[in-house]
Amino acid sequence: MMETIDDLAVEGLRVLVRTDLNVPLDGGRVADDGRIRASLPTLTALKARGARIIVCAHLGRPGGKPDPRYSLAPVAVRLGDLLGARVEFAADTTGPAARAAVAALRPGGVVMLENLRFDAAETSTDDAQRGRFADRLAGLADLYVSDGFGAVHRRHASVYDVALRLPHAAGYLVRAEVAALRRLTADIRRPYLVVLGGAKVTDKFGAFGSLLGTADRILVGGAMAFPFLAALGHPTGTSLLAADQVDAAAACLDKAAPGQIELPSDLVVAPGLGGWGAVVPADAIPADQMGLDIGPQTAKRFAAALGEARTVFWNGPMGVFELAPYAEGTRAVARAMTDGGAFTLIGGGDTGAAIRALGFAEEAFGYVSTGGGASLEFIEGKTLPGLAVLEAP
Ligand code: 3PG
Ligand code: MG
């Protein structure tokens, strides 16, 4: 059984809270604070109970060394605003700044450590190296709380190894995520539709095969569509094509039942990002143009399918939703999900950010997961290291 913070006595104790605050930044400004907001219930409760709170997180993939572009400092400021409390920022992870800030913590106080991935040991595949970093993190605290759901699929020092070294529990976000995602692993109400899109294509092909075993239909958009179009022998122009995934796409098409995978039939294309797009058949992308959104006919077809579903899992936008000319496909899918009667679960930082940017209320969906890779691996039935370690005593 996974314990939660309700099972821990925290008053006066130093509690290391692993959060996922990997938010999009726009020139040093937090562009979407969904993941920061999602961390508030746990932090607010620990604060009210008089814990000395040490927040730790990663931002981006800085490659194991300090890089000011990936500093968590702007995130600490936003967290302070949302918490309505002062958040001290330590300019290192486990060094003198962190130790001094923790020593100065009062009950109910909050300090945030600098980006954990500024230390190569955080993500190392060498157990001993990770272990030494986890020792240093554990040395800062009395208890460990895991609430960074978006990173629980990573066997990283702050996600996995530190839980072996301190009394631990799950935070409210991890508890809520697990409860919501369980609805997609057993007794699934059918038809069950999966919508896959987005730009991080390679990460998702691993899940595709297993989703074919559970989903009635998989609707494919975003950059995810191009390996499939290429596998069918269609030109993809200058689209963002993960060429190494074309064979994987062909294998998925072989494995799928007839009609189980639905691909775009039309696309919005342009010579580059920014201009107004033209609509072309999906099997005829001009050589000098890139696909930037699903087309209106595809959007209509996807919306109709979503209207008949009883369970929907959506990971990845249908196009470059950040730019108005290529946002309509993502908007149509979101609208169909909010208009329909299905239990809808959205996974992934980008997809959550997309629906918020397009003005949809999170409450209009069944659940908006903060995890992308983590939610996919969960519904695939994989063991997530950061969850498994919480089950152990
Ligand atoms: C995410 O944004 O998916 C999580 O924060 C994990 O980040 P990662 O994919 O760089 O490990
Ligand atoms: Mg335990």
Image: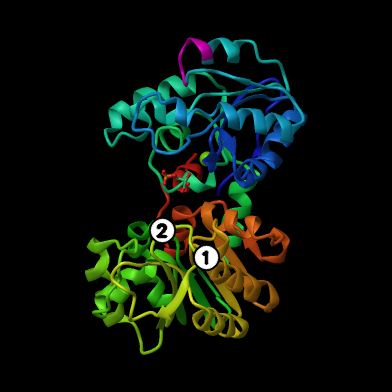
Check disc 2: other Cα within 10 Å, few if <14, some if 14-19, many if 20+. many
Residue for point 49% across, 77% down: 295
Give the residue at x 34% y 61%: 240
Three-letter code, disc 1 = Tyr
Q: Is residue 109 left or right of residue 260?
A: right
The picture places residue 376, in percent across and down from the top left corner, at 45, 60
* Residue 322 sits inside the magenta stretch: no
Q: Is residue 269 left or right of residue 19?
A: left
Check residue 94 for magenta coloring.
yes
SS at circle 2: loop
The quadrant in which residue 280 appears is bottom left
Q: Position of residue 264 (x, y in %)?
A: 43, 79
Q: How is the image coloured?
A: rainbow
Placement of 31 over or under 220, stated as above or below: above
According to the picture, the residue beneath numbered tag 2 turns out to be 199
- In the rendered image, the vertical position of residue 12 relative to residue 45, given as above or below: above
State whether residue 329 appears in this view. Answer: yes
Q: Residue at image x 41%, y 31%?
A: 117
Secondary structure character of the magenta stretch overall? loop
Q: Magenta segment range? A: 93-97
Residue 43 drawn at (x, y percent)? 68, 35
In percent of the image, x 52 and y 54: which residue is there?
350
Q: Which residue is mark 1?
A: 326
Mark earlier in primary sequence (2, 1): 2
